[in-house]
Image (cartoon, rainbow, N blue to C red):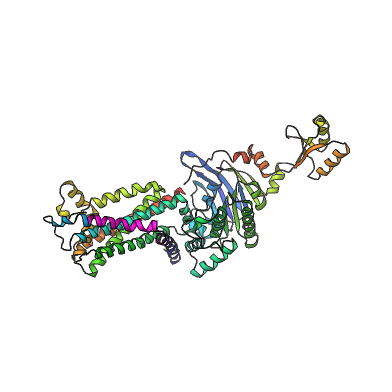
Amino acid sequence: MTAREQGIVAEALVREYRGGIRAVDGIDLRVAEGEIYGFLGPNGAGKSTTVHMLTTLLPPSSGTARVGGFDIVREGPRVRAAIGAALQEAALDPLLTGREHLRLQAALHGLSRADRRSRGEALLERVGLTLAADRKVRTYSGGMKRRLDLALALVHAPRLLFLDEPTTGLDPQSRSALWQEVGRLAKEEGVTVFLTTQYLEEADVLADRVGIIDHGRIVAEGTPSGLKAEIGRPSVEAVPANPDERHRLTQLLERFGEPAQGSPNGVAVRLETGTESLVEIVRALDAEGLDVSHLQLHAPSLDDVFLAKTGRSLEGAAEEPSAEPARA
Amino acid sequence: MRAGALGAVLSVAGGVAWRTIHNVFTTPSLLLPGVLFPLLNFTAFAGGLSRLHDLPGFDFPPGYTAFQFVFILLQSAVFGGVFTGFGIARDFETGFTRRLLLAAPHRSGIVLGYAIGAAVRWLFTATVVTAVAFAVGMEVGGNGVDLFGLYALALLANVAGILWSTGVVMRLRTMQAGPIIQTPVFLALFFAPVYVPLDLLQGWIHGVASVNPVTHLLETGRSFVAGDAAGAGLAFAIAIGLAAGFALWALRGLRKAEAAG
């Protein structure tokens, strides 16, 4: 990717807070134009700090980055004109209506009066807020606020979109609708999307590529399927219906792969071939008259990737205290 | 600044000012304190202390109501700016400032927008206070030009007030900045000759008032009302100097806020 290309390029980006805490500790990123890049990590890993630097809200302590072809330190105004951003907290003015928010946002971006109106109406319709457009935002639900926030980020038709944990706190229906819209923006409009999330499923469903950040450093990067393939093959676990037949079950399963960590009552093996072995296992169990109370195929997940790269589960790591200082 | 950049600054300023004005004029709890506070002071000072006009050496022909009106007008102007500073602090606490910083290509327009919004808000207050003052019989010796000078001086004080408070808020980014904003403003206003002319003050308060720049604004404002524009040049120079100095203070504060994220 050349410097003037439209994606995101970061090199050795660092943000150090007082007391020497490095929220972001020398990350390198390359996000191609039109790509959805999922930035995955637990709370306090440095996701939001990275987004704040790339969106010019926070200057880096060292390192460089270009967003949309513009340097985030020297060409801040041009970066801001090129990007849209919906940050973690949808900071909206409770005294304004949805339509008034769009009007204000359009004015901030310097849109003409005619464009403000037409763009605002189109976006309200797209995010399904036309009927609520003239209600004060203080009456909106969390999902409506998120949708309005997305509309605000899109008001000036940006080439790049930063979404910082966009679905946190949303119900499954709203989450799915937002995923659809983000996918459409990238595929139909060619918008580059930089998405931070702590939800594995979100990164798996949406992202073309994923970067996993932990303690301010990128510990893994690649396509979700590539990352999962990198850390290993699928495993299968079975629990015998009769505990006395545990030994026989172990012998049978070990014909299909090497032993793996399973539950206390179960027997697990990592399959030598792919998931197609499951059919063979079922046939073998039937042929040998072995009854099982539980049979589960476990394909590697992004959490397994995180576990393999950091020695911790992402779900557990999310509960750890944040390394980033508290922010207003 | 290039024409395109200037247009972008003005567009940002227009949006921020519109929001301030919209919120103030659609929310009574935001509008009324800024109007009632000066009216209450006007009633207390001009009504309750009117016998001060009879003091030996108190020479102000338009009367004590007009004498106090000038102080109330300036006070409302400066505090109009201060109240807007509280609004900016609230925006920092709710994260709304982050939205402005993210969306505005040229961020100096944010400060300009807050200043314009504060000025419009104060002009409404000034209109109400003036109407009430005339309604209760205030006499004015000056002509239209003198009164224009008075309001121009007060508008500059308003701009200085908003830029002072903006500079503080941009550095502290919390509502807890309130006392730091208000205390110097209170001191500057009340160490000026509020109740009697400067000549009638004695002792240390006379010394402090003599070097207090607000004294020159107040005395000149009263001269305008009396129809004598004495000292207008110095007063405008002080007001413009304060506004320019606090503009730099506010813009440097904005840079600090940007650096802090």
Tell which of B93 and A273 is nearer to you.
B93
Q: Viewer-proximal residue, A83 or A115?
A: A115
Q: Position of residue A34 (x, y in %)?
A: 63, 58
Q: Position of residue A226 (x, y in %)?
A: 70, 47
Q: Quadrant of residue B64?
A: bottom left
Magenta-tinted stretch: B20-45
Would residue A73 appear left or right of B168 to someone viewing this image? right
Residue B27 belongs to magenta span: yes
Locate residue B153, reporting x and y percent: 27, 61
Q: Residue furthest right?
A: A287
Observer-nearest of A4 and A165: A165
Total marks drawn? 0
Q: Quadrant of the N terminus of chain B?
A: bottom left
- Residue ID at (27%, 63%): B132
Would you say the magenta stretch is mainly helix, strand or loop? helix
Tell me which residue sits at (73%, 43%) in the image. Answer: A299
Left or right, A289 with respect to A220, comes to: right
Q: Is residue A50 visible?
A: yes
Residue A149, percent from left and from top: 54, 56
Residue lying furthest top in this view?
Answer: A244
Magenta stretch encompasses residue A11: no
